[in-house]
Amino acid sequence: MLVAITTHGTEALIGGDYRSNMIGFGDVLGEQQILDVLAYIKSTWPARAIEMHNEINARAGG
């Protein structure tokens, strides 16, 4: 989900009347660059946030 939001932007994924300042970066960054940015951001998270994120990914099959 984080990759999709970063690539396309929140409004594009949610649709309807949803408004967000989170633009998509898919036109400026390649997939590996987006993954690298998200990995860096994740590296700054506290341990419990990483654990919860990993649990969600495991349940989602990602």
Image: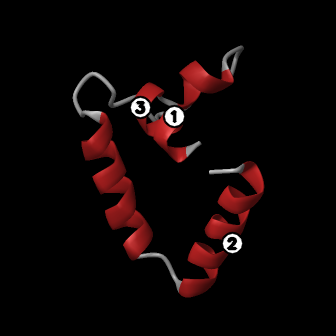
**Dot 1 corresponds to which residue?**
4
Q: Residue at x 46, y 26 (%)?
A: 8
Report the side of 38 relative to 61 (left or right). left
Q: What is the secondary structure assignment of the residue under circle 1?
A: helix
Answer with mark 1 or mark 2, whichever residue precedes in sequence: 1
Q: Residue at x 57, y 74 (%)?
A: 50
Depicted 55 relative to depicted 7: above or below: below
Measured Cα–Cα span from mark 1 to mark 2: 19 Å
Residue 37 picture location, percent across and down = 30, 54
Measured Cα–Cα span from mark 2 to mark 3: 22 Å
Depicted 40 relative to depicted 21: above or below: below
Colour logic: secondary structure
Q: Are marks 2 and 3 in contact (CB under 8 Å)?
A: no
Q: Residue furthest top?
A: 16
Q: What is the secondary structure assignment of the residue under circle 3?
A: helix
**Dot 2 corresponds to which residue?**
52
Residue 33, labelled with which disc? none
Measured Cα–Cα span from mark 1 to mark 3: 5 Å
**Dot 3 corresponds to which residue?**
7
Q: Residue furthest right?
A: 59
Report the side of 9 relative to 19 (left or right). left
- Observer-nearest of 11 and 2: 2
Q: Residue furthest bottom?
A: 47
Q: Residue at x 61, y 24 (%)?
A: 13
Quadrant containing the N terminus in the rendered view: top right
Q: Are marks 1 and 3 in contact (CB under 8 Å)?
A: yes
Q: Are marks 1 and 2 in contact (CB under 8 Å)?
A: no
- Observer-nearest of 3 and 58: 58
Report the side of 50 relative to 33 (left or right). right
- The amino acid pointed to by label 1 is Ala
